Image: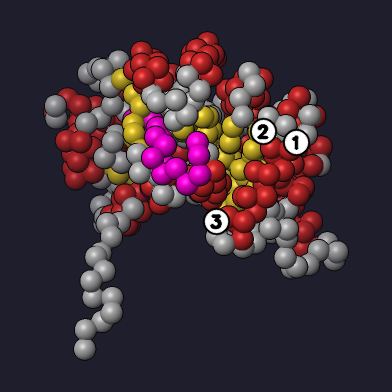
Amino acid sequence: IMSIFAEVPQAPPVAVFKLTADFREDTHAQKVNLGVGAYRTDDCLPWVLPVVKKVEKMIVEDSSLNHEYLPILGLPELRSAASKVALGDDSPAIKDGRVGAVQALGGTGALRIGAEFLRRWYNGTNNTATPVYVSAPTWENHNAVFSDAGFKDIRPYHYWDGAKKGLDVTGIMDDLENAPEHSIFVLHACAHNPTGTDPTPDEWKTIAEVMKRRKLFVFFDSAYQGFASGSLDKDAWAIRYFVSEGFELLCAQSFSKNFGLYNERVGNLTVVAQDKDNLTRVLSQMEKIVRTTWSNPPSQGARIVAITLNNPDLFIEWKGNVKTMADRVLLMRDQLKAKLIALGTPGTWDHITQQIGMFSFTGLNPKQVQYMIKEKHVYLMASGRINMCGLTSKNIDYVAESIHETVSKVQ
């Protein structure tokens, strides 16, 4: 008897998980995994933030807490605090009552709820033909989330200039000018994944001016606030500028990286509307979407984040923990660049320190990546992206020497 699932094709593995699986199977004595998408200490271990441990203990000892359902839109204390982190305590939009939020299952969940809402209610009703622009390159899930939400026209916009190893400002502006009105643009709020290259404040201002004039919709993805520069305010600059310019927008927030809560799936979708009435109607529709998606969000991670953000002392401690992570990444950038220059590695390596956040676009081509993996047992993404947290004081010399050998031998 043939299975009713006999015609189901095998899906390809997710690239980053396939890379990690290959790394685990590698028996070579000297091997390095630069593909993992999470923070690691200098001992190459996951780090549970001290403030998280403290709050977890508080939750365990709080006899007033229970496991009843949360509101469909999520824990109110999380939603309001998360939006304040993104927009600032003194945000006029918050004071005007035109900011709301939806607790989501990580940043991916926030993106998906936002995408589903936009497909149903933006630029007409159920308009699957609205163009959605994602940067080239971008985090691979951006394409899939909007495609699975029903959008039929997902387009790349210019972002990375491989020749100069930096931002393609001209390409971005051309694509903004030529995009159909009401197109949706997914913008990385900071620490662009995978390139680590962000627009400057002046470039953000120009992007905002064109988007406002061309009537383009802004959907920010903020996965690394505080983690990029060590400053929550600096990393939220672009979001806050767009809000100050009067944009109605969505902002997907993830607390996986900056709280180290990868498996707790703590996300937030901040909605900035024109006024209270519009906000109320938008949230009513998002509540319907949540009801049939996950119905009700989990509380543990949400409570950890909410308690931390709403307690002044814990908030200060958290900012210190985040800066610890950001500073380690910045140190690894400085050291890798210095070692490559000292080795006389062909090419220029300024982009290593000009980029920001967890990831760096090395500029290595696919052939060089394969050489790194097969010959040097240094695992990185096919795009040449590396996770700076995979570098440690114990392996950075080996990685630098491996890059030097690879670039010298393989063109």
Tag 2: amino acid: Ala
- The residue shown at (31%, 49%) is 15
Q: Are marks 1 and 2 in contact (CB under 8 Å)?
A: yes
Q: Position of residue 158 (x, y in %)?
A: 34, 24
Q: Which residue is mark 1?
A: 276
Q: Position of residue 40 (x, y in %)?
A: 49, 44
- The answer to whether 390 appears left or right of 308 in the picture is left
Q: Is residue 190 above or below residue 119?
A: above
Q: Please state, as top left, top right, bottom left or bottom right, where the C terminus lies in the image.
A: top left
Which numbered dot is residue 273?
A: 2
Q: Are marks 1 and 3 in contact (CB under 8 Å)?
A: no
Secondary structure under tag 2 reads loop
Few, some or many residues within 10 Å of mark 3 (<14, 14–19, 20+): few
Q: Is residue 139 magenta?
A: yes
Q: Quadrant of residue 6?
A: bottom left
Magenta span of residues: 123-145
Q: Is residue 139 in sight in this rendering?
A: no
Q: Is residue 60 above or below residue 233?
A: below
Rendered image coloring scheme: secondary structure
Q: Which residue is mark 3?
A: 263
The residue nearer to you, when weighing 31 against 186, is 186
